[in-house]
Structures are given as C-alpha cells and as structure tokens.
Amino acid sequence: MATHTLDRLTQLMKELSDIDSLLKKFLDERHSLPKTDETLRMTDMDDTLFARDEQLEKESWLRENRGELWNKYIMYHMGLPYFIENYYEWKSIPQEIISQLDVATDCIITAWFEAIQKEKVRALWLSKYHLIITKNGEEKILATIRYVLYTLCYIPKEIIIYEDRPHYFVQYRELIEWVLDCKLTVMQVEMNGNDWYKKIEEI
C-alpha cells in the first residue's frame, strides 16, 4: 500500500478514536480470523426499517427538535410507555430489507438513546436480531468493525449496510474495507411511510 494511502487511512482512524493502538489491535485481530464467502447485512432502524412519519406529523415538538432534546422530551415529558404504545406497538414494517436478514449473523445498528431504541425493537418484534446501539451515526463505523472482529469472529466477503443517512459509511468506506479486508456496499434507503420503499439503491 502506498505511503500516502496508508497515511490517509491512519488519519481517518484518528478521526474516530484517540486510542493510538486501536488500529494495530484491529489489524492483528483481523489477521487471526478466517475469511469466508458469507455476506453480512446490517441495517439502521429509524427511517430505514421503520418510518417516523406518523409521530412527526402528530407531535409538532418532535418535528422541531432532534438529538438529545428529542430523547429528553420522549423520556421525561411524553413518557416512553406512551410513545411506544402509540407509535410502535402492533405496527407493521415493509419486508424488503428485514426479510433478507439472517438472525444468526446479521444485525440492526442504530444510534439514539438506548432505552428508547430497545423498546422500539421489542415493540416491533425485532428482538431476535443482533442489536447495536451507538450514541451517534459516526460511532457506527467503529461499532461495525468491532462487531465483525469480536462478535462475528470471521471476515465476510461483503458487508451490506442499509441506511437512510449513509454519509458516515460513505466517508469511512475505504477505512472499513481496509481494516476488515472486505467489500462494503452502502445502500441508501428512502421509505414511503411504513407502506413500502421509494428507494433502496447502492451509492
């Protein structure tokens, strides 16, 4: 690998973690694992498996606030039981993505407040799938690498990620492919509520 390429990839890793030895640790672990012809599929939760259109339409406060304010509003004002009961219990989701997941290996990777995300997954009958919860979208990159190295414990031929906001996976695609020595396919998702998908296309 050319020096300038190695420097660029090393810098990308530094953007994600200030642990100097982390890259070497990942590479050492990858070299110890078998390679397979398997495909690993990972999918985001919000607006990828389940659309939030209904709650955004009915709850004006949620439309106007995101991130930590959204979490606090649900937990301490609206109440998590009310939120889940009204917007997730007994709801159906389109099957194009979820039907492709292998319960044994594939996973849901989502960012948000852990208690809220776990309750969403439970209410939608998705608890049988591996679940990864990160604090934000950027943390999904290292979480993906760790899942392959320390949970899957083999190197797949390809990772397919489904995301409505896939910019971090596009930004760090080269890093993931280098560290894990496999292809990363990024699929951008656009839902039509929870009726069907307007778009699932590779970018």
Image (cartoon, helix red, strand yellow):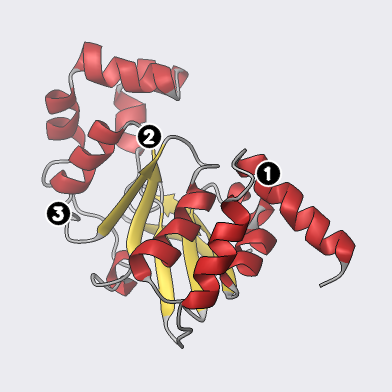
Q: Nearer the viewer, mark 2 or mark 3?
A: 2
Callout 1 crowding tier (Cα within 10 Å): few <14, some 14–19, many ≥20: some
Q: Label 1, on which residue?
A: 14
Q: What is the C-alpha distance between the residues marked 3 and 1?
A: 37 Å
Relative side of 166 to 130, left or right? right
Describe the element under mark 2 as helix, strand or loop.
loop
Q: Is residue 131 left or right of residue 112?
A: left
Q: Quadrant of residue 55?
A: top left
Residue behind mark 3: 125
Q: Is residue 63 visible?
A: yes
Disc assigned to residue 112:
2
Q: Residue furthest bottom?
A: 37
Q: Tell which of 7 and 192 is nearer to you.
A: 7
Q: Residue at x 74, y 57 (%)?
A: 9
Q: Residue 2: image x %, image y %?
A: 87, 69
In the displayed structure image, the side of residue 24 where residue 106 appears, left or right:
left
Kind of residue at badge 1: Lys
Mark 2 vs mark 3, CA separation in Å: 19 Å
Query: Horizontal and vertical percent for residue 186?
Result: 56, 63
Quadrant of the frame with the C terminus? bottom right
| On screen, residue 43 above or below 157 | above
User: Which disc is residue 87 wearing?
Assistant: none
Per the image, label 3 sits on a secondary structure element best described as loop
